[in-house]
Amino acid sequence: MSGQPIYWRDTRGIGLWRMFVTFLAIGVMGFGGVLALCRYELVDRRRWLTGREFTEILSLCQFLPGPNIANMTVVFGMRVAGIRGAIVAFLGLMVMPVTIVLFLAVLYREFSGHEEVRAAFRGIASAAAGLLVALAAKTAWPLVKSPRVLIVGGVVLAAIIVFRFPLLWVVAVAGPISLLLAGRGRDGRS
């Protein structure tokens, strides 16, 4: 046994340059919606991950401090090529968006007083909200076949939306329960 988790696809053929260019493209093309594009590139187009693997990595990364996509890039890069892979994937993802944001910040400072600019940003915000809803549905889909996932998800939604419990408390309680149930499901126990 190679020591790799058996549920991971074989990523040995992914070179550092190929990974850098892939994340560079994700960073540029997915401006404002990188997570959805990252899922498309890694799962649907390149098949470097399964839908379930993507969702599991994303779930882990949501518990870590920092942006989910940056965490996910580091985790994926680390899996492919260790610390060098984590650095290469992260730089690939971040170099162009940071450059573009700095450029746009200068432009926005100059033109933010125009109504047309404000209207454009309202339209962009609407598109981003739709993209987020679509991504949430697509990311959750591989897991909805499990009754445990549906029950825990329903309880979490009810706790936050209906009972208005603070998110931190819901995560503190539901997180360990979810890990316990996921571990039991992998072991074949009920």
Image (spheres, rainbow, N blue to C red):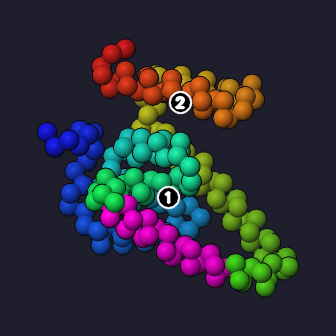
- Left/right of residue 38 with respect to residue 167 in the rendered view: left
> Going 37% across and 60% down the picture, which residue do you hit?
86
Q: Sequence-wise, which precedes: disc 1 or disc 2?
A: 1
User: Which corner quadrant of the image does residue 57 belong to?
Assistant: top left
Judged from the image, the secondary structure of the residue bearing numbered disc 1 is: helix
Please check the rendered image and state whether residue 91 is part of the magenta-colored stretch, yes or no.
Answer: yes
Q: Is residue 57 above or below residue 28?
A: above
Dominant secondary structure, magenta: helix
- Which residue is label 2 attached to? 175
- Which residue is label 1 attached to? 70
Query: Which mark identifies residue 128?
Result: none
Q: Position of residue 122 (x, y in %)?
A: 76, 65
- Left/right of residue 120 with respect to residue 141 in the rendered view: right
> Going 64% across and 29% down the picture, which residue do you hit?
170
Tell me if residue 37 can be seen: yes
> Going 46% across and 31% down the picture, which residue do you hit?
144
At label 2, the amino acid type is Gly
Tell me if residue 137 can be seen: no
Q: Is residue 38 above or below residue 110?
A: above
- Give the residues in magenta: 84-104
Give the farthest residue toward the top.
Answer: 190
